[in-house]
């Protein structure tokens, strides 16, 4: 009840600001009517046209310099290559997670304006906008259960939470920690690494959620945290928890005008609020249920996934009491006969955008294919695969799609391997492949991962 009321108060506050009319605006429109995905898709079309306009100007300038330096060339190759094809420019796009909603929306609205479109970690766009359909979180528990398997495989050397009884004993030990924290939080005294803290059940669920999104990077951390908690030591969890909190230094303007003034609004706050606004404006069904209905939704999510069901319910909870309504919407089905086939990619087990969603959305866009990457985690950014990266590179460079049914394997498995190992890079004969792999590692270390945990 308290969380419901807290979210309702926040939504009401945001709604009042976003629906306030500016007396100096002759259109009579308000910001809250334009915070959904469809206007952004239209903005993308405008961006590629304006970029092409700039490109043509730069090309003409470069052509003139070339003609002046070497004499006039009738072919005018630079000018021809950079010419602006007015009203016909096409999009190059790589979208991940919510970015696949934006991509599918663009492809539905402007199917003839696509040069290349890669959708990675594909959202069921019909479900996103309109609700209904199959749950998107049914693979999350399977990913978390892989932790017990991998821990058993590598043993105590790489998994401090290892136990001789196999995956089932490791799983039971985890359940004991979770039920213990649910019944009673753990106080932790301050140390040189962290301040005083209280470790709660919610803290454990947070690291669990991060781990199913990014198992390759997070399973080792999870193993250490669990091993310490099992011994009754919450120090490492306290340091983890406090490391996620952004350090904020208040400006003089903020101090002078008050904590809740516009001058105290930082980027982090704006980013979280904008994500909430987009979701709640796109998916109207998320702000139409009452408390009793929400409890049923919550229970359904927990039944779908013990790992992240509570978190998924909290995502819906952000929209309670949301009032703005988008002025421009596009109704489904989200589909199209695109000017170039789309390429969709998915891991075998994704906690929130399952492989089945990629296959469904592929069936909506003529000629598209799904490349499956045999790994766990959210999008291919959760684990490097040279095979996947080469297929993606070829698609963007040549337009060629992989064969239907292509399966790429990840180059690492959680706990068993570490991405920092350089042996694979050194064994690559191609400089291009080495650079590609290094870029993939950087992507893995940064995409969708809390900044405080990236080393």
Image (tube, grey):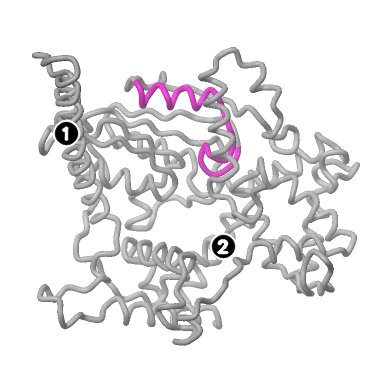
Q: Label 2: how many residues lie within 10 Å, few (<14), some (14-19) or many (20+)?
A: some
Give how far across and how far down residue 135 sits, in percent.
Answer: 48, 52
Q: Position of residue 110 (x, y in %)?
A: 19, 41
**Viewer-side residue, 242 vs 356:** 242
Tell whether label 2 touches label 1 (CB within 8 Å): no
- Circle on res. 311: 2
**What residue do we see at 37% from left, 54% from top?**
128
The image quadrant where one finds the N terminus is bottom right
Q: Is 207 on the left-hand or right-hand side of 67?
A: right
Magenta: main secondary structure equals helix
Q: Which residue is mark 1?
A: 56
- Residue 427's place in the image compared with 218, above or below, is above
Residue 61 vertical placement versus 43 (above, below): above
Judging depth in this view, the residue of 234 and 128 nearest the camera is 234
Is 216 in front, or is 48? 48
Q: Based on the displayed image, in which of its 4 quarters is residue 299 positioned?
A: bottom right
Residue pictured at 10% horizontal, 36% vertical:
86
Q: Is residue 109 above or below residue 262?
A: above
406 over 14 or under it: above or below: above
Q: Earlier in the sequence, mark 1 or mark 2?
A: 1
Image point (37%, 22%), residue name: 401
**As drawn, is 56 to the left or to the right of 348?**
left
Segment tinted magenta in the rendering: 376-397
Residue 207: x and y in percent read 67, 57
């Amino acid at each position: 009840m308290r969380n419901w009321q807290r979210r309702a108060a926040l939504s009401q506050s945001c709604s009042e600001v976003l629906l306030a009319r500016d007396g100096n605006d002759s259109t009579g429109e308000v910001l809250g009517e334009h915070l959904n995905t469809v206007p952004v898709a239209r903005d993308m079309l405008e961006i590629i046209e304006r970029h092409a306009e700039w490109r043509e100007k730069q090309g003409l300038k470069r052509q003139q310099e070339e003609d002046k330096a070497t004499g006039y060339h009738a072919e005018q190759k630079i000018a021809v290559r950079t010419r602006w094809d007015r009203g016909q420019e096409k999009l190059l796009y790589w979208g991940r997670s919510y970015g696949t909603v934006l991509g599918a929306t663009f492809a539905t609205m402007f199917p003839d304006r696509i040069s290349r479109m890669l959708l990675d970690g594909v959202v069921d766009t019909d479900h996103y906008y309109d609700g209904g359909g199959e749950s998107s979180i049914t693979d999350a528990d399977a990913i978390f259960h892989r932790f017990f398997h991998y821990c058993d495989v590598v043993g105590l050397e790489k998994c401090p939470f290892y136990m001789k009884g196999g995956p089932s004993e490791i799983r039971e030990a985890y359940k004991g920690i979770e039920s213990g924290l649910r019944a009673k939080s753990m106080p932790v005294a301050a140390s040189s690494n962290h301040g005083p803290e209280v470790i709660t059940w919610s803290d454990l669920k947070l690291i669990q959620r991060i781990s199913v999104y990014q198992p390759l990077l997070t399973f080792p951390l999870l193993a250490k945290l669990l091993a310490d908690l099992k011994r009754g030591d919450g120090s490492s969890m306290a340091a983890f928890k406090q490391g996620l909190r952004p350090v904020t230094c208040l400006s003089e303007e903020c101090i002078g005008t008050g904590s809740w003034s516009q001058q105290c609004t930082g980027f982090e706050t704006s980013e979280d609020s904008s994500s909430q606004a987009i979701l709640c404006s796109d998916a109207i069904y998320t702000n139409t249920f009452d408390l009793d209905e929400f409890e049923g939704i919550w229970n359904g999510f927990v039944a779908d996934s013990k790992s992240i069901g509570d978190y998924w319910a909290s995502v819906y909870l952000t929209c309670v009491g949301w009032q703005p309504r988008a002025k421009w919407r596009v109704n489904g089905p989200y589909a199209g006969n695109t000017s170039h086939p789309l390429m969709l990619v998915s891991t075998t087990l994704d906690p929130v955008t399952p492989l089945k969603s990629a296959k469904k959305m592929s069936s909506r866009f003529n000629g598209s294919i799904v490349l499956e990457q045999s790994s766990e985690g959210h999008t291919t950014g959760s684990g490097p695969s040279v095979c996947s990266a080469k297929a993606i590179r070829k698609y963007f460079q040549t337009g060629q799609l992989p064969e239907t049914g292509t399966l790429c394997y990840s180059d690492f498995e959680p706990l068993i391997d570490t991405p920092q190992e350089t042996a694979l890079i050194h064994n690559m004969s191609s400089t291009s492949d080495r650079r590609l792999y290094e870029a993939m590692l950087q992507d893995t270390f940064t995409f969708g991962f809390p900044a405080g945990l990236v080393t």
